[in-house]
Image (tube, rainbow, N blue to C red):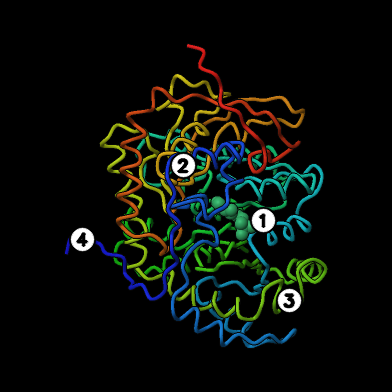
Amino acid sequence: MKTIIEPFRIKSVEPIHMTTPEERRSKLAAAHYNLFSLASEDVIIDLLTDSGTGAMSSNQWAALMRGDESYAGSPSFFRFESAVQALMPFKFIIPTHQGRAAEAILMSILGGSGRMIPSNTHFDTTRGNIEASGATAHDLNIAEGHDPSLDHPFKGNMDLIAFEQFMDANSQNVPAIMLTITNNAGGGQPVSLENIRAVSAIARACKKPFIIDGCRFAENAMFIKRREPGQQNRSIPDIVRDCFACADGMTMSAKKDAFGNIGGWLALNDPYLADQARIKLIQTEGFPTYGGLAGRDLDALAQGLSEIVDENYLNYRIRTNEYIIERLDAMGIPVVKPAGGHAVFIDAKAWLKHIPPLHYPGQALACKLYEIAGIRACEIGSVMFGQQPDDSEKPAAMELVRLAIPRRTYTQSHADYIIEAFEILRAEASSLRGFSIVRQPRMMRHFTCQFEPRVRTH
Ligand code: F0G
């Protein structure tokens, strides 16, 4: 069959509250044009994030009932630990309430003033935790990863030459090497197994721990299977094990590729580092057999991990993005290519050339999309990255809008609705106006800042 269907039936539904464009215009104004300030009930299709927003399976709901809430030594923890170790062969698995808690614990051990941590691209919370420790975060993604329209199978790869040069110059200050799979900030683009192995070899030659941020490991493995020579006949769990066998540890947001609504973990092989991490865990998250989670959450994650590596699911997952991207591309809308794992990214800079970066073309696009169709997307451009520590402003490298697709939540007719919304948006694109920021906090402004539409100047 050519048609790739949603590989599930729907047993329980959540109603969507429908709104009119007039209602949305007034909600948007009341939210000061910041989509984070909307009530989610006023959103028809919510593509703000794929984190914690997926649908759990009937077996995950059943697993919740198995959850054992003992403070210490719960069987839920041991089921969770063995589900993680079946895919990621690390010695010590330390649960946390979400990914950034694992990062904070890791950086409390490895970070510190003067230290430098390279990666393909650090996610914002990883960068935030590195910088909060006094260390610096360094992104060494291949150049192809910064060209939205360029087709390349593994745009998330580390630039190995830049990485070796970086290590030659700074090795004594580097406490660990990281790699984000898939590269979220760069468009959900995958990293090849060959690149993971090469980064690992350099890390081992330099005797540095190699830590994978594995949030979207299953999507990354599916891309390896589809796109990397020699990997086509291998199972997803085998590819996943190969990826993590190269590393000395991982951080994980289980809100992504473990089908959790909440959860995360830190995994390590080094007993000394693991001991230090557990001490910090007890101080900040909880005892090492629950780490800030309920026993039932651990059981839901154990079950989720067995479901996420299903190829039928991963085929449908990646096909959803390809389907939307192919149609937007055919309409002439600039999109990040090829399709990434968890989201569709629109290149607002290339599309809305009449809006300068510091008038926030991505924000203009995201607001119009909400007004037209009630779709909530997220600006990933100068609103998110433009604010400087001295409160000045600098345009970001790219002006993207991310449509993050929650896992197993929406159907193909929802995808068709999204595509239709872009048809309407295309007809109005040249009349879109930019925004100015009228109120903002000192950092991470995109969550809470307030906007005003600009008056047309041409
Ligand atoms: N690493 C990556 C690559 C991520 O995408 C995220 C979260 C984290 C770490 C932090 O995990 O949210 O569980 O604390 N990304 C979400 C997003 C928030 O919308 O992309 P967390």
Q: Secondary structure at mark 2?
A: helix
Residue 3's tag is 4
CB at disc 2 and ligand 1 closer than 8 Å: no
C-alpha gap between disc 3 and disc 4: 45 Å
Disc 2 to disc 3, how far (Cα)? 43 Å
Residue type of the residue flagged with mark 1? Lys
How many callouts does the rendering have?
4
- Using the numbered discs, state the Cα–Cα distance from disc 1 to disc 2 in whole angstroms: 50 Å
In the rendered image, which quarter is residue 204 located in? bottom right
Return the residue at label 2. 370
Which SS class for mark 1?
loop
Instruction: Reply above or below: 150 against 303.
Output: above
Query: Which one is earlier in the sequence, the residue at label 1 or at label 4?
Result: 4
- Rendered position, 259 above or below 110: below
Say if mark 2 contacts mark 3, CB within 8 Å.
no
Q: Which mark is residue 207?
A: 1
* Amino acid type of the residue that numbered disc 2 sits on in the rendered structure: Tyr
